[in-house]
Image (tube, rainbow, N blue to C red):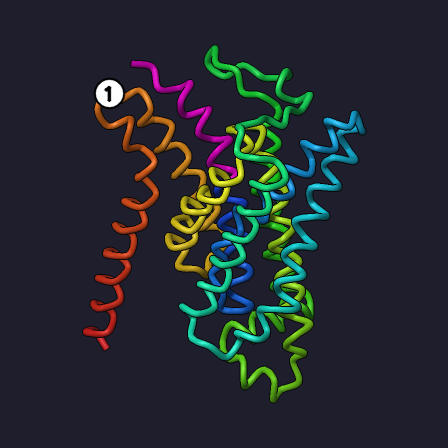
Amino acid sequence: MNYTPFIISGLGIGAVYALSGVGLVVLYRATGVLNFAFGAIGAVGAHVAWQVLEWDWPLAVAILAAVAVSTLTSFAYGRLLAPKLSHRDTVVRAVGTLALALVLISLMGIIWGELPRRVQFPTDRMYVLISGVRLTYTRIIAIVTALATVAAITLLLTRTRLGLDMRALANDRDLSAILGVRILRTETAAWLITGVFAGFAGLLLADLVRLQGTFLTFLVIPAIAAAILGQLSSLWVTAFAGIAIGIVEAVLTPMGWISPYRAAAPFVIALIAVIILGSTAKSALKDR
């Protein structure tokens, strides 16, 4: 069987998983929050883009509106609610974002319903041929965007004062406050950045897969798996893990009996990674 079409298809979805995973890692490194609402935030933005296009407004306006709404939603939670949970347990802070996801799912259901839709870009009709298989420009844009944002965030974290503050927060929040790091400003910036990531990821998934609130919300799971593979710290490992997960899911599609269970691939990959990383950590402790 020729798996090339499935690998190429998986590249596009994997790039979005990579983009999402990096957005999760950036926020976690700065705030210690694992954002389960990431997919829902992106889905809200994608619905706004679909609505704007239904009004026959330009595509550029729809894209800007989507990213703006996702960013503002993330900003509002990060500025108003997240600080109230900042000294609570990690699990409590994660559950707070899960509550946000449920609220957003309800709002999307009330406003737009649960009928599957698509957001289509002109780049869907443009493509390059690789081994006789079409790779659309939309998928190329997804791959380039994922890699470019990883490079940009890496520079931000290593070359700017904001990046230094984020890295300090990741190590010790209380000590960072004593040293003069503006905690609220830094964490708000992290929520803004992850909101931008969510907006673009939601748009791309609404085009490559489908636009449906609940469906896009739970597509955060592969992104979390990618983040776990990157140990919630390495941006590049997270990005390549996301791409790999997308390819694995796509390659499993034609495999008869296993195809209905391909959505479990991220869980299995993440579980294997946790077991391997746990074994490595134990070995390192024994060597000391």
Q: Tell whether 78 sits left or right of 277.
A: right
Report the residue marked by disc 1. Answer: 256
For the stretch drawn in magenta, the main secondary structure is: helix
Q: Which residues are magenta?
A: 1-16
User: Which residue is depicted at the point 69% across and 35% down?
Assistant: 49
x and y percentages locating residue 84 in the rendered image = 57, 75
Provide residue 194's location: percent of width, then percent of height. Answer: 60, 55
Type of amino acid at the residue the image marks with label 1 = Gly
User: In the rendered image, which quarter contains the N terminus?
Assistant: top left
Q: Image quadrant for the C terminus? A: bottom left
Looking at the picture, does residue 15 appear above or below residue 84? above
Q: Position of residue 215 (x, y in %)?
A: 47, 37
Q: Is residue 169 above or below residue 278?
A: below
Tell whether 43 sits left or right of 243: right
211 vs 165, nearest the viewer: 211
Can residue 127 be seen by looking at this rendering? yes
Local secondary structure at mark 1: helix
Residues packed near mark 1 inside 10 Å, few (<14), some (14 to 19) or many (20 plus): few
Tell me if I can see residue 240 in this picture: no
Residue 3 shown in magenta: yes
The image shows a total of numbered marks equal to: 1
Residue beneath the point at 45% across and 42% down: 219
Residue 236 colored in magenta in the image: no
Seen as rendered, the residue at the extreme bottom is 178
**Spot occupied by residue 55 in the image (x, y as percentages of width and height):** 77, 28
* Nearer-the-camera pick, 3 or 88: 88
